[in-house]
Amino acid sequence: MLFATLPLLFAATALASPLHQHSSLYKRACATGPDTAADFVKYTGYSTPALNAVTPPGYTNAYTNLQASSNADGYGGFSVLSTYDVAGCAAQCTSRANCNAFNIFYERAPAAANSNCTSSATIKCVFWTGAVTPANAKNTGSTQNNFQIVIAGSNGYVASAIAPSAGYAMPVYLSNNAVQAPLDCNGKDTYLGFQTFNATFDASRCAAACSAQAAYALAHPPSDGSKPKTCQFFNTYVESKNGVAQDQKCVLYSQTWGKSVATNTGYAYGQDVYSVGMSYAYSNATDAGVCTKA
């Protein structure tokens, strides 16, 4: 059956910080080196594993050795690791139905009450449904009871199935909603059609379709001398029929649209219900096709 191994429908998008999640339940190691927040973030014992980490098969590296963790779309929990194990973190993500990205990092936290340490270092593996990106790696920590929690050696990885092809920006996760684009600022339709693929979900197919449409439009400009209408944005998702995945849709547009117009959750046809899942939106990295008032 098509898409049998894919997550069909996800929970609603959520933004969450992993810093405060059940931290007291886990055993931590003492922080190594001078015991201040400033020394923690610059300690080479934390940066070296991050810099030397090998990108695991099936994933694309999104960022390396940041001093911040991601607040991405679709928080899926976390686990605590005994070592900085990127491959192990990836394996956990792969085993989770709704995990399409993960972030691994060292976190400075207060030591346990019965510990001889002043602070401790926890290695966290955090799971996300949406992509982790440098743009959403904004969580630099917090201060709790006069103790400064900070992040070091933070690496982010995105599943290859949703990683963008060359020329396209990182995806925006739309959960179970597809783009329902209105007319642009000049009252023009930006919809350029769609393609359907009956195979394992892979966003790169849509990137190729969008690029091919743009190339064709430029090579065959309108006879009236108007500007060619090229693909600058696409929305791809899994379409399901009565809860069973049917195919991957790639819907092409000449302009980038935001989450506010992702209002299409599916439709009913007779006794059948068609729904949207695993929906992502991608923009041209150099020209998002922003509308300019004529």
Image: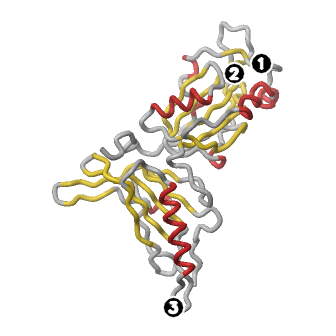
Residue at which label 1 appears: 32
Which SS class for mark 2?
strand
* Residue type beneath disc 2: Ala
Figure quadrant of residue 52: top right
Please name whichever residue, 94 or 134, is drawn nearer the observer in this view of the structure.
Answer: 94
Residue at which label 2 appears: 121
Please name whichever residue, 29 or 239, is drawn nearer the observer in this view of the structure.
Answer: 239
Q: How far, Cα to Cα, is label 2 from label 1?
A: 8 Å
The reply to whether dot 2 and dot 1 touch (C-beta < 8 Å) is yes
Position of the N terminus by quadrant: top left
Figure quadrant of residue 60: top right
- Dot 2 or dot 1: first in sequence order is 1
- Dot 3 or dot 2: first in sequence order is 2
For residue 114, which numbered disc appears in the image?
A: none
Q: How far, Cα to Cα, is label 1 from label 3?
A: 69 Å
Residue 31 screen position, x and y as percent: 74, 19
Q: Nearer the viewer, mark 3 or mark 2?
A: 3
Which SS class for mark 1?
loop
Q: Nearer the viewer, mark 1 or mark 3?
A: 3
Residue 196 screen position, x and y as percent: 37, 60
Residue at which label 3 appears: 223
Q: Is residue 175 left or right of residue 141?
A: left
Compared to 240, does 77 lie above or below? Answer: above
Q: Residue at x 41, y 70 (%)?
A: 193
Which SS class for mark 3?
loop
Residue 104 screen position, x and y as percent: 62, 32
Q: Is residue 13 left or right of residue 291?
A: left
Please name whichever residue, 76 or 21, is drawn nearer the observer in this view of the structure.
Answer: 76
The reply to whether dot 3 and dot 2 touch (C-beta < 8 Å) is no
